[in-house]
């Protein structure tokens, strides 16, 4: 039985209004590239919005002496939930990369188009920037109270742009006096572990990770690195770092740039992710394994969607590979 007969479109059971049906057709033919960018930006927005909001409560609660307003556990949990929500909301539209290093890996190893990758990275950074600016507006009064409190206490220069200062709500900074070599090592190891988990959890032959559990497994991995290694200095996502840093500079000026540490957070995830990808392919991956039936079901569903939207058959995309706006897809779902 072909994928198109196995998977019936939602419209067959719940027809949409004519105006929305016309929009769907136009979107699929002309604007899908733009919708994918919006989905990437939305996913990064959700991830950043959740984590930055929790970070705001943590930082402001400490500065304004409001007990119980936030904690490191809350920050890690918020980022975890944000990752899961981002994947649930956007994965079906843009395959949910949300991370420039994952996008670069897809360009180098999964035949993801270069210029499409550039657009994705810009969208990811913009989504993070927008989320930080929204959180700033929501917390503006408390943030300015905290800044005034630091100025009154004479601790503005020592705390403002640290993990415990108002600048640290949006940008990533290290505690003054930290050895940047150790901080860079911490970033590399955490990013390597995260990428290894991502590649494993999105591998169709992994029978312990399904399309349903995958978002939460990846989310928990992010939570673990935040809880265990965040205090050392950790960005874990160049889009979150650059978007947040640009937001901090928009709010507080160029002094919020982060100096040398900014280069570590912006760049370290790329070699870590690429090395993790090579390590996973050489050691763990095996194309002779049987495909997880739940992954095959998802892929054939995406295949059927493609056949309804375009002339000729096109297979489902890899979660890190090409998507439908620029080229036909080439993934064989009948190998299991």
Image (tube, helix red, strand yellow):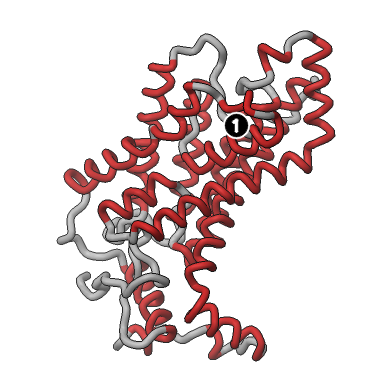
User: Label 1 belongs to which residue?
Assistant: 171
Q: Quadrant of residue 206?
A: bottom left
Query: Residue at image x 52%, y 22%?
Result: 259
The image shows residue 298, relative to residue 132, as above or below, that is below
Query: Residue at image x 25%, y 53%?
Result: 109
For disc 1, the neighbor class at 10 Å (few under 14, some 14 to 19, many from 20) is: many
Residue 177 point in image, percent of width and height: 52, 9
Quadrant the C terminus occupies = bottom left
Query: Residue at image x 36%, y 29%?
Result: 189
The image shows residue 300, relative to residue 101, as above or below, that is below
Residue 33 point in image, percent of width and height: 48, 68
The residue at the far front in this view is 254
User: In the image shown, does 115 or 6 lie closer to the viewer?
Assistant: 115
Q: Is residue 147 left or right of residue 196?
A: right
User: In the image shown, does 330 or 201 lie closer to the viewer?
Assistant: 330
Residue 22 point in image, percent of width and height: 59, 87
Q: Quadrant of residue 289?
A: bottom left
């Amino acid at each position: 039985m072909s994928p198109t007969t196995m998977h019936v479109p939602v419209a067959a059971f719940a027809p949409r209004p004519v105006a929305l049906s016309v929009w769907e057709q136009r979107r699929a033919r002309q604007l899908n590239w733009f919708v994918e960018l919006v989905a990437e930006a939305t996913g990064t927005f959700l991830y950043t919005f959740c984590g930055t909001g929790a970070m705001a409560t943590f930082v402001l609660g400490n500065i304004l002496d409001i007990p119980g307003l936030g904690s490191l556990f809350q920050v890690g949990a918020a980022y975890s939930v944000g990752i899961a929500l981002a994947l649930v909301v956007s994965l079906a539209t843009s395959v949910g990369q949300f991370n420039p290093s994952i996008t670069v890996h897809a360009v180098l190893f999964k035949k993801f188009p270069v210029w499409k990758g550039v657009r994705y990275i810009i969208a990811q950074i913009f989504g993070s920037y927008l989320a930080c600016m929204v959180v700033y507006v929501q917390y503006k009064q408390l943030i300015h109270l905290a800044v005034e409190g630091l100025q009154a206490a004479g601790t503005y220069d020592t705390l403002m742009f640290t993990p415990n200062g108002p600048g640290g709500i949006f940008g990533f900074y290290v505690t003054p006096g930290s050895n940047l070599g150790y901080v860079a090592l911490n970033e590399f190891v955490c990013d390597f572990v995260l990428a290894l988990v991502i590649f494993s959890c999105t591998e169709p032959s992994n029978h312990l990770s399904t399309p349903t559990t995958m978002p939460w497994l990846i989310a928990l991995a992010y939570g673990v690195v935040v809880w265990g290694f965040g205090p050392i200095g950790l960005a874990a996502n160049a889009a979150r770092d650059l978007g947040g840093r640009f937001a901090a500079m928009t709010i507080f000026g160029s002094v919020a740039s982060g100096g040398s540490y900014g280069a570590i957070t912006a760049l370290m995830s790329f070699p870590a992710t690429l090395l993790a990808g090579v390590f996973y392919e050489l050691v763990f991956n095996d194309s002779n394994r049987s495909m997880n039936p739940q992954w095959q079901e998802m892929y054939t569903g995406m295949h059927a969607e493609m056949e309804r939207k375009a002339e000729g058959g096109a297979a489902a995309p890899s979660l890190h590979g090409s998507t439908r706006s620029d080229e036909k897809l080439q993934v064989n779902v009948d190998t299991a």
